[in-house]
Amino acid sequence: MSSDTDFVAGRFGHAAVPEGELTVRSPADQTDVVVVAPWSRAQVDLAVEAARTAAVSWRRLGATARAALLKRYQTALRVHLEELAQAISREIGKPMWEARTEAQAMIAKVDLTLGEGAAFVRDLRVEDLPGEIRHRPLGVIAVLGPFNFPGHLPNGQLVPALFTGNTVVFKPSDKGVMTAATMARCFDEAGFPPGVFNLVQGGIPVAEHLVAHPGVDGILFTGSFAVGQRIVAANAHRPQVLIALELGGKNASLVLDDADLERAVREIAFSGFATAGQRCTATSRVIATRAIAGALGARLAAAARSAKVGHPNEADVFMGPLISEAAREALLAAQRKAREAGFEPLAPGGAFEASHRGFYVRPAVHRAPLGLHRLAGYTDVELFAPDLCLLVVDDVAQAIEVANDSPFGLSASVFTSSAEVFERCAGELDVGVLHWNRSSAGASGRLPFGGLKASGNHRPAGILMGASCVSPVGILLPPKEPAPLPSWPGLSF
């Protein structure tokens, strides 16, 4: 059944003349049709027009009034928390415990933005100049969200964008239609002025139209490296458009001989298998020194075999399905390639036939042959699935070298009891997020977030997200009185 899942100029609706429909089926149960949503590129034009119309009055409203509306949005999120979690769980396949955690993180983001985050976009007075540093909103910002955290990740961009005085057009993943529509209901109930927040549903044609739209002043994108490249190419003729890219990762956990084995196993198992491995910060490469590698591999394999996989509504489920059959087939093909190259399946993983017709797999752990640290199509690509490859190295220097031998540079973890060794890793690992004796996943919203190399373009998210939503303006004020008139050699007045 079709639903009014667009929200444009303060009204729910859908395309008057649809170009097509999105049919969202739960990856946990393909018989569960979550929603059918009509789409049209014309909705993008209407949404951008509404956002541009509302931009000046929203900027002039002031930070205090905008913060008050965001607190009302936070209240609406609390009211609809269970509904939001149900939408996330059905559309993405997350167990309900994890879907609720995501919804709670959305609520917390408002306080982080209005509190600690506000310090990074606060106007400053430079008294001895005198002068000021002001932060001007970009204007209309397009936010394009991913499927894996369909609420939390775009929310982490929407809230700072709105707080800093921008209007927004939100294009969610085509897998997260109802999650986004529930968010729109919360903005509506909070009383946001028409056109300040707009939502358009659709797939690739809608996204392409939005990122190339001449009425858009900034683009905040979370997704794959390939799509990020296309967004940059589509705007090569518009250098004034700010583009913030949060892309993929092939994240490593370095485990050294002096590590706490029990902690390392628990943290790595979580980061590798939570959300079925579909986190940009998930660990996929475990780089261990020789003395600890054997015990570590055995313990990780036992954890993989113990993980309960099943439908999100089943009791005590740790991990739900992958997002699609294509994702499952890509994982299985990569694992076959690894085994053909001599990787030992400590926990073989494989497709899992659950009680519902979904895209289930079991977590896997593969150990590389000694001396092999890179396999094209396996260790160098983001599988976005619950698979750990164990790579054995001689020492910390080689561990760092192997970790950096990746096109990506998002997140890493270092497990060691030595502060000196950790500081060496901190100075040499090419990543934007680094954790010591903690999971590579589960980054703190109170810290910056973003990656190097193919993981992004150095536009920070996390606590610094607001900085990607403003243009800093340097203002030089009149000199303090009494001030002599300026003069220069060779120029008479």
Image: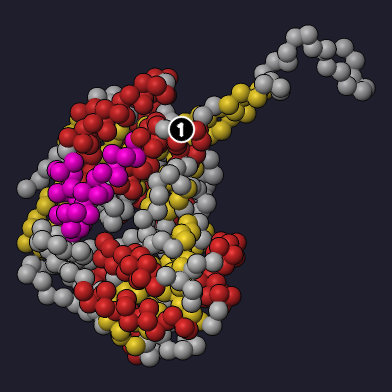
Q: Is residue 40 left or right of residue 219?
A: left
Which residue range is magenta in the image?
A: 81-110
- Disc 1: which residue: 118
Front-most of residues 22 and 247: 247
> In the figure, 343 relative to 420: above or below?
below
Image spot of residue 231 (x, y percent): 43, 52
Front-most of residues 69 and 105: 105
Q: Is residue 205 left or right of residue 315?
A: right
Predominant secondary structure in magenta?
helix
Image spot of residue 157 (x, y percent): 38, 42
Residue at horizontal 21%, vertical 65%?
A: 319
Is 96 within the magenta?
yes
Image spot of residue 219 (x, y percent): 42, 44
Q: Mark 1 packing: few (<14 Cα in 10 Å), some, or many (20+)?
A: many
SS for dot 1? helix
Front-most of residues 221 and 132: 132
Image spot of residue 263 (x, y percent): 37, 67
Q: Quadrant of residue 215?
A: top left
Q: Amino acid at mark 1?
A: Ala
